[in-house]
Structures are given as structure tokens and as C-alpha cells.
Amino acid sequence: MVSRAERGPLADWFWTIDRFFLAMFIFLMGIGFMLSFAASPAVAERIGLEPFHFVKRHAAFMIPSLAVMVGLSFLTPRQVRRTAIILLIVALAMMLLALFFGVEVKGSRRWVTLAGISIQPSEFMKPAFVVVCAWLFAEHARQPEIPGNLFAIILFGIVAALLVAQPDLGQTILTTAVWGGMFFMAGMPWIWIILLGAGGVGGLVSAYYIFPHVALRIDKFLTGEGDTFQIDTAREAIIRGDWFGQGPGEGIVKRIIPDAHTDFIFSVAAEEFGIVFCMALVALFSVLVLRGLSHAYKERNDFNRFAVAGLVLQIGIQSIINVGVNLELLPAKGMTLPLISYGGSSMVAICVTAGFILALTRHRPEKRAQDRSLFRVAHGMPAE
């Protein structure tokens, strides 16, 4: 245990970090590692790999992910902003390269290979995009003559265009929802919100008619006709799990679920550990999001408020999409469950998100002093 009397970067970090957030992130990663033992061996055997291939890789991904999360949590808000700008520029450049030189998987070009490592740039774009847009919204709120909102709209257009070009409609919807939430929190006029909402609906309708795979998934969801093997087996696994599950390693349906270790790990958790366990997992994500929004509500700094709210919304909405697909409440869409599903790019990128949240929610003495001065001035008292 680090003493309060100690001074130094580590001691200051330990006593200023939001330890509840830190514990929640690490705990969710631990649950993900536990579930990889349940979900991934069957997948590995099905494709001719040794049973614990994905378990070992999952463990290997956790090490740099934890290092990234803790390392970023040491940053100041200004350093978070600068890091996000650099990360966003690099991620957008790599997304553009992926369109021409990336590896095509199932008709989409989302991956680039560097030094033998496959990277999905759009995963790293998401937290950086949220932070940069939060800065733009905050700058406009601080100085209305700065066209921060216009720049945020232009940046959103660039990001959405690159995602649609891959194509990755799921990430486009996620990014749009998070950006729309921040746009609303920034106090935009209702007419703008209505127009952007109408544009979003128009985009979904256009996607239905432009992209055959989108139309196919929506039609299958609405009619139940066609190849619904993934959803049917996921539902069967959840039903078989009942309230308390079949027990660790006792799942049977999980052996035939495609992508059981990534997109459908929630169904595997339901079969082996039960609906009660899954409800507790959903509650953990809910508490994480609500705590972040509560912190954002109390935050006086516009940049911190918008950034923290946007980052926790990103985690929350991505979780809703993953769980909704598993429960057949949403059309099938390949999207990981944050900190739980297998995937190197996804895990490291979510830990970038977590690191930014930890950095922006730290309790800084200079920030408290500034808040006290603002309070005194606002109430007609002399500043300290």
C-alpha cells in the first residue's frame, strides 16, 4: 500500500486516481480472460489449432493493454488532448491505407498489417475521435467565435465516410450515436439535433438499399427467414443456460456457435454461468457508464465533461449492441463486448478509452482550488 505521506509520481497517481474505475476495468478484463477458457477452445479446435491457442493470445494481449491503460492514466487533460490528436491522425491515415492496401475479410477492408501484426485502425480512432470532438465542442463553448462545432461536424463527416467505405456500418452507427450524444450535451439548438437525427435515419435507409449484406441482415431480423444459424444457436445457448448455467466447461451449444470467443461470448457466458451471471455483467457495465455520466455532470471543465461522457457512452453503447445482437433484439452485427471479447485491437483500444477516462477523472488539488475560486466568485465572494 502506498502511504499518503509519500511524494512522487506513483504516490500522487495512486491517491488521485479513481480507484473504483480502475478496479472495474481490471475486474472486467479478468472476467473476459475467464470466459476465454469457456468460449475459445471449441473455436480453436474447429479451425485446427491447439485448444488453448486463443486463451494464450488473450493473455498476451492483456499485458500491453494494461500497460497502455495505466500509462495513459498518468496524463494531464492537456496531454490527453494532444495524445488523442496524434492518435486520431495516425488512425485516420491507416484507415485510408486499409481501403487500398488492407486485408479484405468478408468483403470489408478494415485491417492493415504492420511488422506481421494485424491492426484494425478504426478501433483506435474511436476514443481519439471522442476526445478531439470534446475539445472542439468545449472550445466553441468557451469562445463562440471559434468554429469548433463546425470543425466537429466536418471531422464526423470524414470519419463516417471512411467507415462506410470499408464498409463497417456497425462502427458507423456506434460512432454516430456517441457523437450525437456529445452534440446534444454541448447544447446545440433543437433544430440542429432534429436535422442530424433525420440525416441518421436517412443514412440507415440508404444503407439498406446500397449494401446488400445490410439489407439481408435486416430482412433476416424482421422476418426470421434465411440463414439465421448464428442467432439461433446463440439463443439456444442462452435458453439452455437457464438461471444458473450448466457449469464451467459444461456448455455444449457453444461448440457450434460461430465467433463464440468474440461477438457471441455473451451467449457462451449464459450457457455456462447462467442468466443471473449475465445480468450481473450487464449491471457492471451500467454502473460503469452511470458513474462516468455522474462524474461528467459534476465536472465544471467543459472539455473534461464532454470527453468523459463521450468515452463512457462509447463503452455503454458498444455493450448494448453486442448484448442486443446476442439476445436477438438487434440485427446481427459483428461487434465485440468491451474488455470481455477476444481481440487484440479491440482490447488495446478499449484500454486506451479506459486510460483516457482514468486520466480525466483524477482528483487534482489544483483543479479543486480552481473550482473553489470559481464558486466564491460566482457567489460574490473574493477569490482565494
Image: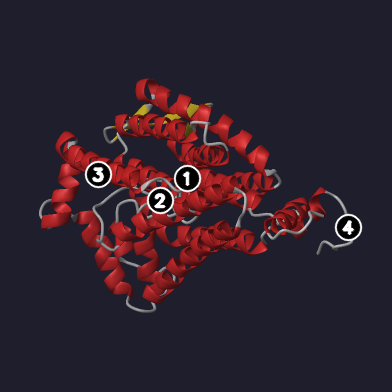
Lower sequence index among marks 3 and 2: 3
Q: Left of 30 or right of it: where is 317? A: left
Q: Quadrant of residue 235?
A: bottom left
Label tally: 4
Which residue in the protein does label 4 denote? 6
Q: Which residue is mark 3?
A: 198
Q: Which amino acid lies under the numbered mark 4 shown in the image of this protein?
A: Glu
Q: Are marks 1 and 2 in contact (CB under 8 Å)?
A: yes
- Which label is found at residue 346? 1
Q: Which is in the foreground here, disc 1 or disc 3?
A: 3
| Residue on which the image places disc 2 | 336
Observer-nearest residue: 39 or 352? 352
Label 4 environment density (alpha carbons within 10 Å; few <14, some 14–19, many ≥20) = few
Please, is residue 270 above or below residue 85 in the view?
A: below
Q: Nearer the viewer, mark 1 or mark 4?
A: 4
Q: Of circles 3 and 4, which is in front? A: 3
Q: Earlier in the sequence, mark 1 or mark 2?
A: 2
What is the CA distance from the residue labelled 1 to the residue labelled 3? 30 Å
Quarter of the image for residue 20 reads: bottom right
Q: Is residue 321 left or right of residue 38?
A: left
**Secondary element type, mark 1:** helix
**Residue situated in front as seen by the camera: 292 or 225:** 292
